[in-house]
Amino acid sequence: MKRLYHYIPLHFVVFLIIGICFQFFTQFWKSDFLKILLFLGVLAMLVFLIKNKVIRTCIAFVLFFFVGVSSVYLNDDRNYDSYYQHHLKDNFTVVLQIHKILKPGNYYQKYEATIIKVDDLKTLGTVLLNVKNDSISNPLKVDDRLFLKPILKELIPPLNPHQFNYKSYLAKQGIHHQIFIDENQFLRLNTKAKTVFGLSATFRNLIQKGLEKYHFKPDELAVINALLLGQRQDISKELIVDYQRAGAIHILAVSGLHVGVILWILSFIFKPVERIKYGKFIKTVIIVSLLWMFAFIAGLSASVVRAVTMFTFLAIGLSFRRKNVVEFSFISSMLFLLLIKPMFLFDVGFQLSYLAVFGILWTQPKIYGIWKPKYKIVNFFWQLLTVSLAAQVGILPLSIYYFQQFPGLFLASNLVIIPFLGAILIGGILVIITAVLDVLPQFLADIYGVVISWMNGFVSWVSHQEEFLFKEISISFSSMLFWYVFLFLAVSFFLKKSSKSLIYFLISILFLQSVFLFESNDNKSKKELIVFHKSRFSMIGKRVGGQLFIEHNLDSVRFKNENSIKTYRITEGIDDVKKTNFKNFIQFSKKNILLIDSLGVYSVLGMKEPIVVLQYSPKINLTRMIATIKPSQIIADGSNYKSDVILWEKTCLKHQIPFHYTGQNGAFIID
């Protein structure tokens, strides 16, 4: 590991990441492409011309910082003249090309689509296409081209505190608008043009049709598609939850685990090739080619491309039989990926993958060295156990930060499933090949289906051991960073066992405790009033420290499962949620809040310039109400009819009264 610290690309990666984050969050660089290239060229020349080693190193770091800045700028379609939004006019038409099929929603089939033409101009840029369910008899395929006159809509940000920000998630993938259509609103164009993604989808569809002949159960077929073809669209929500709760969700995503197993199998199979002249080179070429063939079949998704890139570097490094080849391949692949696709940095899968690998490289050898089993089978499971533990060291704080839970039986899941994963993958590949050739015996298909069902059943059993699933754990971003500092220094002390590392470790504990106490005190003293958004319902909460008093009109079952309240409660560390009745009036933070419900009563003596919350579409004359009580602001929640909201907004604009609609502007919060 010491050699890794002195590995120059590691330092470049650090400054590249800093540059990527700086540009993404600040949009610092707004100049044109020529200035970027000129600036980078000058820095590169200085690196070669300056003799002083320290100055040259500093300039190299600055160079990679600006390489990170420029890579974000260059990968943002909005910075190009041909971006579709720059060419929108009245009554414009577009030609869309389907790029990717996404998991469908309750009401719409979802696709990533590229706008290749606006009117007669060639353009670029990706949008989210929503096609209404049951409105289309022949599903869209990758590379299908559609002609339509769309209404481009802004992506909607989260409407309640701490909910998943789908708008931000799509923005990091270069998607800033969405389109909603029915089948009768577009025309399919005849085209024979095929992209790499289209060819991959066609080949994958051929495989899926071959598999469908052999009567696999829906869950079996869905898991086979996920394991071997990288397609998770058909997996039921219940099965995904089971794998998440069991700590085995990585099994369903074609990632480093699968590609690593395939690399190990291929290395074993092609070992004899090393005996011939240039055998190592030939073996490497074959393995890398087969890995990328697997990536092609799996749809070239981001997780597959990342994993295959990482193991391509590893396969090449292994052919040279150099020391620390795994570590150097790990860093080099990260540098290469971030140079090409800087937005990978913000992908949860990318973060978890590289942190898991880092944890394994850093801690697994030392954990493994604690005990030396005599028997090979025991040694195999001990090695597997130490790898799983080391990976958890790398991802634990981040996974809690994102998923707010920790599966205590993740070791059981991995120890049972991973030893058989190689056989499952090999068996699956053979099943696919024979199914496509139509020579797969039904009894072999049945056996493979039973194995997949056993795996699903075991995962389901593990996921239902509630006492081992630690749920509703919430940590802030700053806490997560301090947890990583603590883990880093704890492992350093474990590895070195020096007085200096002990002091650093103890200091990290003090810092971690300080952050915990600060956030705990902040939560206990925090007070805020929230008008949540819930379509067709009303939810108003008053938070006082660790308690949330909420008035709502949901039934008990719906309220228990209400995600917006649950997310707010967990993230904010709320201990107790109580139902209350504000009786149409709340006094909070020296402000008067008047709730006007369907009865339309608003005459309250002595009230001056209140904040008014409209609920359940009250039948009132808003102009008269404004003249009577002179509200400082008017809020409409999700329980109101949209037609009423539109009229109220116009009235407020006319009388210059601030208006807030939770269905458009999100929850209204007073703190």
Image (cartoon, rainbow, N blue to C red):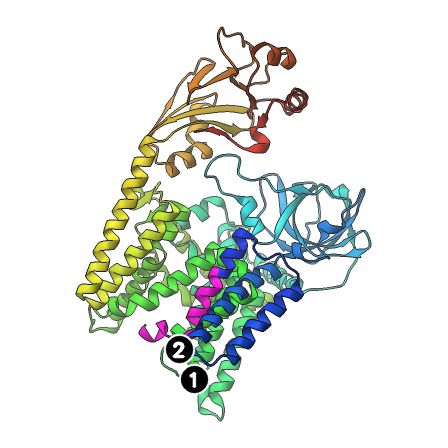
Front residue of 337 and 228: 337
The boundaries of the magenta stretch are 1-18
For disc 2, the marked residue is 325
Q: Where residue 647 sits: x, y (%)? A: 67, 21
Task: Assess disc 1: are there few (<14), some (14-19) or many (≥20) residues with their C-alpha within 10 Å of its C-alpha.
Answer: few
Q: Helix or strand or loop: what does disc 1 sit on?
A: helix
Residue occupying the point 53% across, 35% down:
159
Residue 283 visible at all: yes
Circle 1 sits on which residue? 320
Query: Which mark sits nearer the N-terminus, 2 or 1?
Result: 1
Query: x, y (%) of residue 661?
Result: 58, 27
Image coordinates of residue 96 in percent, x first then y, are: 73, 52
Say if 320 sits above or below 507 in the image: below
Side (left or right) of 191 relative to 552 = right
Q: What residue is at 41 percent from the left and 49 percent from the top?
A: 244
Q: In the figure, 641 relative to 401: above or below?
A: above
Q: Is residue 484 above or below residue 168?
A: below
- Taking the spot 23% from the left edge, 67% from the top edge, the residue there is 495
Kindly identify the amino acid type of the residue bearing the numbered disc 1.
Phe
Q: Secondary structure at mark 2?
A: helix
Q: Nearer the viewer, residue 452 or 357?
A: 357
- The crowding category of the residue bearing disc 2, from other C-alpha atoms within 10 Å (few below 14, some 14 to 19, many at least 20), is some
Q: What amino acid type is highlighted by mark number 2?
A: Val
385 relative position to 245: left or right: left
The structure residue drawn at horizontal position 46% and vertical position 75%, both measured from the top left corner, is: 56
User: Relative to the observer, which residue lies in front, 43 or 261?
Assistant: 43
| Position of the N terminus by quadrant | bottom left
**Left or right position of 499 against 642:** left
